[in-house]
Each structure stands twice: as C-alpha cells, then as structure tokens.
Amino acid sequence: MTPVPSRPSRPRGRRAGLAALAALALAVPAPVVAAPRPAAAAAGLQEVMFVGNNWEGTADVIRSHGDYARLGRINVVPDRDARLREIYLNPVRLAFFLGIRQGPGEGHDQLVDDMYTTPDGTSLVVSRPSFADVVSVDLATGQIRWRFPVSGYRADHMAVSPDGSRVAVSASTGNTVHVLDIRTGQQLGSFPPGTSRTRTSSPTAAAGCGTCPSAR
C-alpha cells in the first residue's frame, strides 16, 4: 500500500492571521444606504405653519418652532372682486352668501377654512366657504393656479391623503365630498358625506399635516 503523503501543516502565525481576517470580515458592517431625502429638504425648504384669518381672507406663515415668528402673509382671495361680481349677479348664490355672512360668519364673510400645501411646497390649497370653492395659490407669485367650484353654495373642511397627492373637500349644502388632484384641481371622484357634513378627516389629517385650523 502506497503511503499517502501527509499535508504540511500551516505555520501557527499564518493560521492566526487568517482567523483575524475572518473575524474582521464578520465585524465590518454592511454598507449603509441612506434614505432618500424628502423633496422639501433637498430643495432647501423649511417647515412652517399656516394660520388662516377667516374674515380677512389671508393666511399668516408662522415658523413651526423656536419663537414661532410670523414670516409673512398670503392673500388667499386675490380674485375677490371677480367672485363677488359673480355672486351679486346670481340671486340664489347671493342669498346663500348673505346667509353665511349673517350665520356662521357672525356678520363677516368666511374666506379661509382649511389649508394644505402641495407636496413640493410651492402652492397653498385653500377651501373658501363664502365663495363655495377650493383654490390653489402659488406661493411665489400669489396668483391662483387652479380653482374648483364645489357643489352647492358652501365649501367646508378638507383633508389630504397620506401621500399628499389628493385633497377631499366637503360641500355641505351640496351633500357631496369632492376628491381632487392637489396639483391640478381635477376631480378624481366624489361620494356622499356621513352624518357630519362639515368635517372631513383622514389618517394624515388626524396626525397633523403641518397646517393648523383656521382662525379669525
């Protein structure tokens, strides 16, 4: 029987070096993949709060932390004259308009209800009860990007979808909730409201969306 040559043993120092390399390989963590930065952060935007001045038709821009200073004021009714002209030429609309003024408006027009920014932070979407519509106001120019007249004669509360792409607005006198594309104002669908026709909610709205309830 031919003897099988024995395998030469590795030097102890070499074995120790290989063990150290193996331990080092196990100890090195996998490459860390950074989460994508939000578009707002990438664009150098900052988080703010919008406070609606319902009777005045403006929205104050408030720093969301620190001193909560007012950073600016937005006119959300730049088309006021055109809307009033339409209302005064329509007797039925005028009756509802004056009813809102004397009822929930306590002698004032209701010009700001709920507000949400578009996902890219360039526009503010506002429901305007007395004008029975929803508008998107360009934050750079102050001009209206789109306008959606709701069913009936009063626009009420809104809610935004979790991804920020859709906004729902309650048209209380029209017995309808409109679902709109927040960027274009196009209606994507509608449905009848529940027992409360003025409050619209979503998981995002309930958790807070960087906006605040409208104030006088």
Image: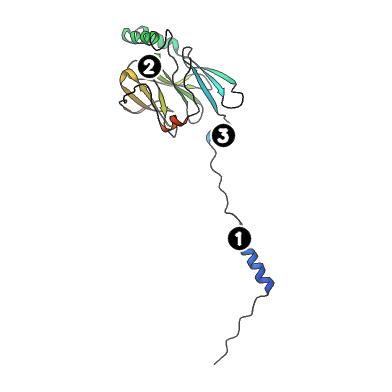
Residue 178, label in figure: none
Considering depth in this image, is 8 or 107 the residue closer to the camera?
Answer: 107
Q: Marks 1 and 2: CB-CB under 8 Å?
A: no
**Secondary structure found at label 2:** loop
What amino acid type should be assigned to the residue bearing mark 2?
A: Ala
Q: Around disc 3, counting alpha carbons within 10 Å, would you say few (fewer than 14), some (14 to 19), or many (20 or more)?
A: few
Q: Earlier in the sequence, mark 1 or mark 2?
A: 1
How far, Cα to Cα, is label 1 from label 2?
Answer: 66 Å
Could you say which quadrant of the image residue 203 lies in?
Answer: top left
What x and y, as percent, mark residue 140?
54, 22
Q: Earlier in the sequence, mark 1 or mark 3?
A: 1
Residue 25, label in figure: 1
Looking at the image, what colour scheme do you see?
A: rainbow
Residue 163 versus residue 60 in the image, above or below: below
Considering depth in this image, is 197 or 98 the residue closer to the camera?
Answer: 197
**Secondary structure found at label 1:** helix
What amino acid type should be assigned to the residue bearing mark 1?
A: Ala
Residue 41, label in figure: 3
Q: Which residue is mark 2?
A: 132
Please give the name of the residue rendered at 36% of the width and 16% of the height, measured from the top-left corner: 154
Q: Around disc 2, counting alpha carbons within 10 Å, would you say few (fewer than 14), some (14 to 19), or many (20 or more)?
A: many
How far, Cα to Cα, is label 1 from label 3?
Answer: 36 Å
